[in-house]
Amino acid sequence: MAEQALSTPVTAAHKPSVSASRWSGTIMPRLITGLTIVLVWECVVRAYAPAYVAKPSTVVLAIPTVITDPAFLQALGSSMTAVAEGLAITIVVGTVLGLLMGRSTTFDRIFRVYINGFNAMPMIIVLPLFSLWFGYSSAARVATIIFAAIFAITMNVADGARSVPREYLEVSRSFRSGRLRMLTDIVLPASMPYLLAGFRLAAGRALIGAVVAEFFLSVGGLGYYILYNSRSYHHNEAFVGVLLLAAFGVGFELLVNWATRRFMPWYRRDEKTS
Amino acid sequence: MPTYLRRHAPFWISIFAGITLWEIAGRSTSAAFMVPFSETVVRLWQLVKGGEFLSQLLDSGKLFLSGFILALVVGMPVGMLLARIRTLRIGVEPYIMILYATPMVALIPFILSMMGFGFAPKLLVVFLFAVFPVIYNTVEGARSIKPELIEVAKSFRSSEWALWREVMLPYTLPYTMTGVRQAIGRALVGMIAAEFFLSATGLGQLIMSASQNFDTGGVFASILIIGLLGIGLTRLGLVIEQHFARWRQ
């Protein structure tokens, strides 16, 4: 990009076909990098590491056995149910709290300190406390997921609700719309992009929350599956779990990007990560 | 001081209300479940006076700082290099994105069984948590450099080193600092995770041993202290970011 900027523009005659330039421009380097990573990993592990350490060739061989293993499927189901449950509660409560904070100064003043404060806390420190409160159970896991995710949504929705154009509110007021109606019909749709940005953050944190909770509480799930298998030196099986987690992380990311482009094409995504 | 009062009164009222609520909730439930604010402060004072707290804090601080600095020292040059060499960036970008989105905690069991309980595995955990935001944001910043600037520098026969020092670094630094702010938060989570799941040391051990001994007051005191530490460090990150943001055009 840098080198070509001031050089002569490519003339139409020389312009390569779009698919060919895409192939050599992006797909090739990516493929080569991917292959290099896999190759280096394989060689290094073969040369220096003990036999149980995961390497690409053995991880690939482990995939079929792992994804047909009922214990793995059960673990996956358990984790995903917990994440879905936690995220559902998070979205509802977080959005309501965020809308109230964004539109009411009183609410904002009461809750701002706490939302900012809790958001800045490393979330995993609540685990010992949650294990005291909820026991070593899946309730403690859902609580951890909610605690990990909710502040990201609340802060983003509050930002969104605050930035609703004044004219929208004035028009709705002139048409004698009630406060609740204004919140649900104008403020909420207008802060949708912020909600989605918050959701992207929250989903990532919910995944971390679930894994950490399973490590700490020994509750059955994907995180515990990884822990258990790597403890018993089944690194390949455990690594399939990590790959799946990575896929979920990337999946959430892509889902939100797609939804923002598809449903809110007018919105230039503003980076709000933390 | 009326303006100070008017601006900050809601904050203090809210804090005061929160503490009151905590105190009431703590007094009306069993001590195994929740401890009132006053007792938490007393327990905290005991920990501080016993010297236990300070040594654990130093221990954690050492881990946090070394992991964080390592992430910065590695992340910044890597980020700029990726921005400078286009093909490399295009090739590596998706993998960095994947690593950025992967919950790094999932790697802790592997690190444990390969590297054991020493300081090095913990350092690796903090590093892994913190490095990707630094790389990601530095690349983002370096991509925003106007190509004309590099062209001009080149036409004046600038050396590669001078180009990095005079153009790349000042342009990417504000973005890197956004990465630094994010990295501070992540490194803190990494630090506690390493202390929980690798070998119990530092503040992580403080809270773990309190919870194992059913010392609810100790658990609350540790959470309070780690929480305040997190808030303080996050604020510091924001201040640093805003200081450098003035460079951004």
Image (cartoon, coloured by chain):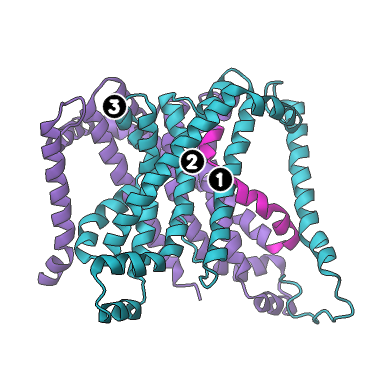
Chain colours: A cyan, B purple
Q: Quadrant of residue A262?
A: bottom right
Q: Residue furthest top?
A: A232
| Residue named by callout 1 | A249
Q: Are marks 1 and 2 in contact (CB under 8 Å)?
A: yes
- For disc 2, the neighbor class at 10 Å (few under 14, some 14 to 19, many from 20) is many
Amino acid type of disc 2?
Leu
Examine the rendering and report whether any part of residue B121 can be seen: no
Compared with B249, B234 (above or below) is: above
User: Do the dots labelled 3 and 1 sit on one chain?
Assistant: yes
Q: Position of residue B111 (x, y in %)?
A: 57, 29
Give whichever of A104, A7 is nearer the camera.
Answer: A104
Secondary structure mainly formed by the magenta segment: helix
Examine the structure image and report whether residue A75 is included in the region drawn in magenta. Answer: no
Examine the rendering and report whether any part of residue A116 can be seen: yes
Q: Quadrant of residue B7?
A: bottom left
Give the residues in magenta.
B84-107
**Disc 1 to disc 2, C-alpha distance:** 8 Å
Residue at 35% over, 31% down:
A140
Amino acid type of disc 3?
Leu
Q: Position of residue B144 (x, y in %)?
A: 60, 70
Q: Position of residue A195 (x, y in %)?
A: 42, 59
Q: In which quadrant is the C terminus of chain A drawn?
A: bottom left
Helix, strand or loop under label 1: helix
Give whichever of B11, A158 is nearer the camera.
Answer: A158
| Residue named by callout 3 | A132
Q: Give whichever of discs 1 and 2 has the lower sequence position.
A: 2
Examine the structure image and report whether residue B86 is included in the region drawn in magenta. Answer: yes
* Left or right: residue B101 compared with residue B184: right
Residue at 61% over, 71% down:
B145
**Disc 3 to disc 2, C-alpha distance:** 22 Å
Mark number, residue A207: 2
Q: Quadrant of residue A70?
A: top right
